Image: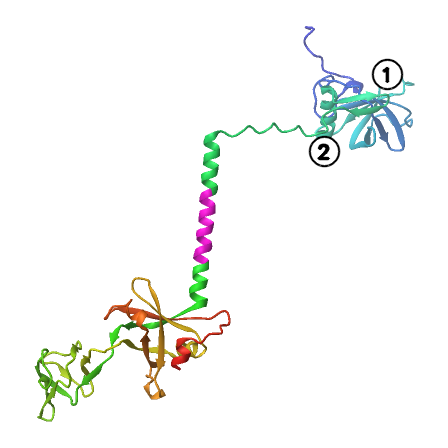
C-alpha cells in the first residue's frame, strides 16, 4: 500500500460519525474551550468540524454513549455556547482521562458559529491569552475616502440643474397662486358684453315683413316700411339727424315680430355703454361691494359701473337680471365700439374706506 493512500479505520475507536470517510479529514485546532456533558465539565484540548478532544472525569458507563454536549468558548467579557449531540468515545488506555466527542450531526445549526471561530483563529483575529480567547480583528468602520473636488463641467451641470429646479418650482408656485387668485378674488359672468353707444332704438310696431329700407335717410325721410299682418303698410320716418345702426335682422324681406329692435339711432353726444344680463350671484356680489370690471379681448382691464334694472320684472326666466354697464370717459377711450368683453367682479379682501362706483350706481 502506498504512503499517500489513506487507510480506512476498522476499529470502533477510530470510526468517524456523520458519514466522514477519513479520521483526519478535518484538522484539529488547539482552541481553548470547555465541554459540558451532563453534569460533568471537561477541558477541551482541540476541536475540528467533526469532533472535539477533551479530558476530564466521566462516569464509568460514559463510553460509547450518545448524549447532548454544550461547547463553551470563553472570551474576555462574554462567552459563546454551542449545543449539539455527540458520541463519547474513550481514547487511549482504560485509565486515561482523554475522550473524543464525535459530533452526530457535523452540519447542524452549530456549524456556522463554530466555523467562524475556527476561521478567525486561523486568520489571527482570535488569539489565546491563557485560557481565554481575545479578538484582535477590526472594531471600527473604515473611514471613507475624501471626496474628490468636482470638475468644472460637473459644477456647471449641477448649477444648471439647480437653476432649472428652482425655476420650475417658482413656475408651479406662480400657477397655483394665479389659480387661487382667479377663483377667490374674481368672479366672471357667463354672458359676454358687447360695447355699444347710447341712443334710441326703433322697434317694430307690428308683426309683419320689412318691405322698404333707406339706410341714408335724412330727417323726416322714411327709414323703413313694414307690411303688417293686418294688411296695413306702416312707414317710420327718421326723427333726428343721427347715425343709424341697423340690427342683424334689419333687411328687406325679413319677417319680424312686434317689438323687435330694428335700428338704433346714435346722436352726436352719444356715450359708450353696454347692456347685458347678469346672474343673481353676480348681483349679490355687486350689492356686497365688489368692484365691477371689464376684461377686454386684448387682456386690458377697465373699471365700470353696473346699474341694475329698477324692477325685478326685468329678470328673465333663466335667473338673470338686466343690467346697464356705464363706462367713464377714461375707460371709453380705451375700448372700441362693437368689441366683446367679459364682466367680472373683484372681491375686496381688505376693508376699504372709499365708495366704489357700483355703490354709487346702486
* Residue under the point 42% across and 64% down: 182
Marks 2 and 1 in Cβ contact (< 8 Å): no
For label 1, count other residues whose C-alpha is less than 10 Å away and answer few (under 14), some (14-19) or many (20+).
Answer: few
Residue at the image position 12 percent from the left and 81 percent from the top: 254
Q: Residue 151: horizontal and vertical position, in percent?
A: 49, 29
Query: Dot 1: what SS?
Result: loop
Q: Determine which quarter of the picture holds residue 276.
A: bottom left
* 46, above or below 277, in the image: above
- Give the residue at mark 2: 109
Tell which of 43 and 274 is nearer to you: 274
Q: Is residue 92 visible?
A: yes
Q: Is residue 241 left or right of residue 8?
A: left
Q: Is residue 8 above or below residue 194?
A: above
For label 1, the residue is 92
Question: Relative to the observer, which residue lies in front, 40 or 165?
Answer: 165
Query: Viewed as shown, does residue 223 lie left or right of 129?
Result: left
Question: Do we see residue 67 in this rendering?
Answer: no
Q: Nearer the viewer, residue 1 or 253?
A: 253
What's the magenta region? 163-176
- First in sequence, mark 2 or 1: give its number: 1
Q: Quadrant of residue 266?
A: bottom left
Residue 327 place in picture, x, y as percent: 32, 74
Give SS at disc 2.
loop
* Residue 202 falls in image quadrant: bottom left
On the image, the x and y values in percent for residue 46 come to 80, 20
Amino acid at each position: 500500500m502506498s504512503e499517500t493512500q489513506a487507510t480506512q479505520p476498522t476499529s470502533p475507536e477510530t470510526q468517524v460519525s456523520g458519514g466522514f470517510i477519513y479520521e483526519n479529514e478535518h484538522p484539529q485546532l488547539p482552541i481553548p474551550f470547555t465541554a459540558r456533558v451532563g453534569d460533568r465539565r471537561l477541558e477541551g484540548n482541540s476541536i475540528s468540524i467533526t469532533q472535539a478532544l477533551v479530558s476530564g472525569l466521566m462516569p464509568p458507563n460514559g463510553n460509547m454513549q450518545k448524549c447532548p454536549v454544550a461547547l463553551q468558548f470563553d472570551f474576555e467579557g462574554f462567552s459563546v455556547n454551542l449545543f449539539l449531540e455527540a458520541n463519547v468515545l474513550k481514547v487511549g488506555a482504560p485509565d486515561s482521562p482523554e475522550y473524543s466527542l464525535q459530533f452526530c450531526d457535523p452540519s447542524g445549526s452549530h456549524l456556522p458559529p463554530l466555523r467562524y471561530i475556527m476561521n478567525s483563529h486561523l486568520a489571527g483575529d482570535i488569539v489565546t491569552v491563557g485560557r481565554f480567547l481575545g479578538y484582535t480583528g477590526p472594531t471600527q468602520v473604515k473611514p471613507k475616502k475624501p471626496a474628490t473636488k468636482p470638475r468644472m463641467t460637473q459644477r456647471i451641470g449641477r448649477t444648471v440643474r439647480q437653476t432649472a429646479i428652482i425655476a420650475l418650482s417658482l413656475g408651479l408656485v406662480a400657477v397655483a397662486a394665479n389659480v387661487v387668485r382667479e377663483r377667490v378674488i374674481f368672479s366672471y359672468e357667463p354672458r359676454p358684453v358687447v360695447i355699444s353707444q347710447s341712443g334710441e332704438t326703433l322697434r317694430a310696431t307690428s308683426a309683419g315683413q320689412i318691405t322698404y329700407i333707406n339706410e341714408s335717410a335724412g330727417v323726416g325721410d322714411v327709414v323703413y316700411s313694414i307690411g303688417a299682418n293686418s294688411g296695413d303698410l306702416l312707414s317710420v320716418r327718421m326723427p333726428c339727424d343721427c347715425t343709424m345702426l341697423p340690427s342683424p335682422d334689419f333687411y328687406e324681406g325679413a319677417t319680424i315680430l312686434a317689438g323687435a329692435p330694428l335700428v338704433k339711432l346714435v346722436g352726436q353726444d352719444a356715450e359708450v355703454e353696454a347692456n347685458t344680463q347678469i346672474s343673481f350671484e353676480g348681483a349679490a356680489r355687486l350689492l356686497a361691494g365688489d368692484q365691477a370690471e371689464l376684461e377686454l379681448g386684448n387682456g386690458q382691464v377697465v373699471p365700470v359701473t353696473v346699474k341694475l334694472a329698477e324692477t325685478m320684472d326685468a329678470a328673465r326666466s333663466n335667473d338673470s337680471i338686466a343690467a346697464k354697464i356705464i363706462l367713464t370717459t377714461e375707460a371709453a377711450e380705451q375700448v372700441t365700439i362693437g368689441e366683446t368683453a367679459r364682466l367680472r367682479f373683484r372681491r375686496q379682501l381688505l376693508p376699504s374706506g372709499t365708495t366704489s362706483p357700483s355703490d354709487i350706481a346702486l
